[in-house]
Image: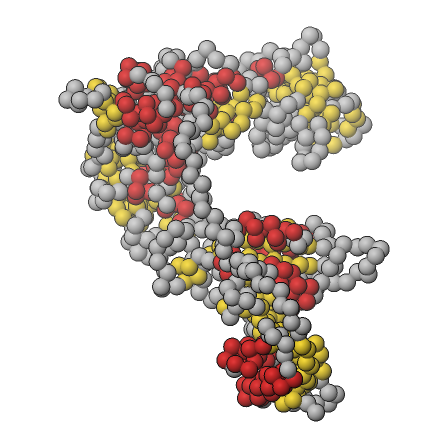
Amino acid sequence: MQFPESWLRQFCNPDLSTEALADTLTMAGLEVEEVQAAAPAFSGVVVGLVRDVQPHPNADKLRVCQVDVGAAQWLQIVCGAPNVAVGMAAPCALVGAELPPQQEGQGAFRIGPAKMRGVESQGMLCSARELGLSADHAGLLALQGAPQAGADLREWLSLDEAVFTIKLTPNLGHCLSIIGVAREVSAVTGAVFHRPTFRPVAPTLADRLPVSIEAPDLCGRFSGRIIRGVNARAETPQWMKTRLERSGQRSISALVDISNYVMLELGRPSHVFDLAKIRGGLTVRWAREGEQLELLNGQTISLSADMGVIAAENGVESLAGIMGGESTAVTLNTTDIYLEAAFWWPDAIRGRARRLNFSTDAAARFERGVDYATTVEHLDAITALILDICGGQAGPADDQITQLPQRKPVRMRVARCEKVIGIPIGSDRMGEIYSRLGLQAELDRNSTEPAWIVTPGAERFDLEIEEDLIEEVARIHGYQHIPTQAPVARLHPLPVPEGQRTLHSLRLKTAALGYQETLNFSFVDAQSEQDFAGQADPIRLLNPIASQMSVMRSTLIGSLVKVLADNLNHRAKRVRLFELGRVFARDAQAENGPMQVAGIRQPMRLAGLAYGSVVPVQWAEPERRVDFYDMKADVEALCEGSGEGTGELQWMPVQHPALHPGRSAEVRLGGERLGVVGELHPQWVQRYHLQFAPVIFELDAGLLQAQRLPVFVPINRVPAVQRDLAFQVPSGVSYAQMQQAVQTAIQNIPVCGIIREVRLFDLFTPPGDTTSKSMAFRLQLQDQQTLTDERVDAACQALVAELATATGAQLRG
């Protein structure tokens, strides 16, 4: 929320400087994000009075003006603004003046003497845009009132006034107005709060518009009146324009500006209908499925049954509490209007605008709760401004009440409040705070312990439980008055299982391999899930923060590829990335638990990506592009010491939607699927405009966390025996299958129990032979006693027989 300081001080003017006031608001829970001047820095600009205007002798669209800048000094200035006229007052930049940058990235714009089409110009008459006051550049900024020639423009327009930007938490909806903020300042500082008064508008017409409320759970109170004979072309007063612009609102027309002004000052959103465009009366109801509405922003929406509307005989006219419809919008030709101020139930408004992918100031207020007791008073305030600025005759206020919130008293124990805040405050001080906030509070006389009974006001929808009242005491008493004390408690060290390594240790191990960690959203676009995970039906979000973040990711690969693309756009040549994060997948067996949702698995994954050369460019080693086997070595380093039992890694062919079909593999650790490793699929290399394919791995972090404990094994004093066996193997048999058959033989055949290690040391495919290949293994055999040739031969023969049975491999020679 943004507002000028003078507007706030109109209702509460504490004896504080601007900086002290900003600090006071922040410490009261209304965080001041920024305090800046109402206009950007510029100098050398004064009030100029145009005394004479003559056509330019050499240009049809230029004028030669004589401008009075005070001290009996007139300047000749060439001007091309269409609205320059004799007698007008406008900003005049003197020679040497410095104006704000006219385009982003430029420096200050310095005014010097110039000659325009052969005529000397001794300065410049300025528009609002050239001074950085607004986006209006249709003509000169016409200064209203009777400014003195030569007066400093910054002083005349109060351009050095401070403009506050505050960031409110959702529970402070009552502060979404100048009155609300002023009430808080009064409560904190004790300064007088000048509560606005509303004089009822005496009706001069008897006209009424029939209004029927069919949905009391949508609208609790509806107030409105007819005003006829308004001048919609009336000029918005400069004081109102200035306050709106300094509050971030663009001036549109008098009727719209008045409605926005009252919303900012009093926190009351309202709507102005063109009465001539309404057929019959108005009906407040829930929408019907399939109804359409064109909104004021030009968007045509399809309504659902849980959206509130204001309808007439000719259809839906407005989206209740959010935005009006185009069909009954006021224009400059409007003469008769219907003015509406209502109370909409917060639950009936909350989330609807977000579902339609936009937000409005009205929805932001109504979904937090707006004062339901002052609809008629605020209606009178808006009416009085319209009559003063646009003229017209007002009808009587039509006020209908169907169902209003019941403000139930909330009990707060004094001892409990002091225990939560941590310091003694005192019952009297608590009562003073509630009184300053305008809350009705009294001591509980029937309680055995001191307690306050507080009844929230009509604007306070955030006070429902005891903790809410405790927060109010802490805010107004001042967080800065609560001393910082370290907690005193017994420390109980948590057990650290030796067989479980931490996720942080995985991060450190991956970083030690040369990878840099990235952090990405768990939300991705649906196309990314289809590309990298083959998910045609991903887990969708009900209220995505952006269209490209509409589903939950089931793989980390897509996130890493997009980070790679961003780095390459910044001219990176060699990239090493990793991410440790959760992925999301449907699982009917998943149960609720820590970090879990029923029906959704959320396992941790560790993924890495390598792109470019294996090592940075250097003199000692030729440049070589990273490949599958480089990544395989990194994965083996990460898996060292992980897994149950032997923790042996197995590499098997895999078909993965994100990876190259012939340059990828599935990794198994101790017989369990650990993840995948491989080059990015050529299709995605082309789609994401990569020069060549990165190599990627994605592993199950849970399996990597399991750590094998060291076991003492005495050194065997008996020397080992080695044997080399070469097999002719069918071409379809993989090394993993041979490896599995060897392990089966060692575990199940007693004579093979002396085989300690089997390593593949040669792989050969005869030229022209597509049916078989040669695989040579080196066996290491050892026992507690010296091995004989008979035992070694028996073990080798049993192993050969098992491999022949399991894989069809035949011993060569």
Q: Residue at x 69, y 64 (%)?
A: 630
Residue 322: image location, x then y, percent: 37, 41
Answer left or right for 477 relative to 305: right
- Closest to the observer, 653 or 364: 653
Residue 56: image location, x then y, percent: 73, 27
Residue 513: image location, x then y, percent: 66, 54
Q: Is residue 112 above or below residue 764?
A: above
Residue 636: image location, x then y, percent: 62, 63
Answer left or right for 493 relative to 446: right
Q: Residue at x 78, y 25 (%)?
A: 114
* Extreme-right residue of the structure: 619
- Closest to the observer, 391 or 772: 772
Q: Is residue 49 above or below residue 572?
A: above
* Extreme-left residue of the structure: 446
Answer left or right for 620 relative to 214: right
Q: Residue at x 42, y 39 (%)?
A: 492
Location of the C terminus by quadrant is: bottom right
Residue 46 seen in the current view: yes
Q: Residue at x 59, y 72 (%)?
A: 784
- Closest to the observer, 648 or 691: 648
Q: Quadrant of residue 787?
A: bottom right
The colour scheme is secondary structure
- Closest to the observer, 531 or 494: 494
How many marks the image carries: the answer is: 0
* Extreme-top residue of the structure: 71
Residue 179 seen in the current view: no
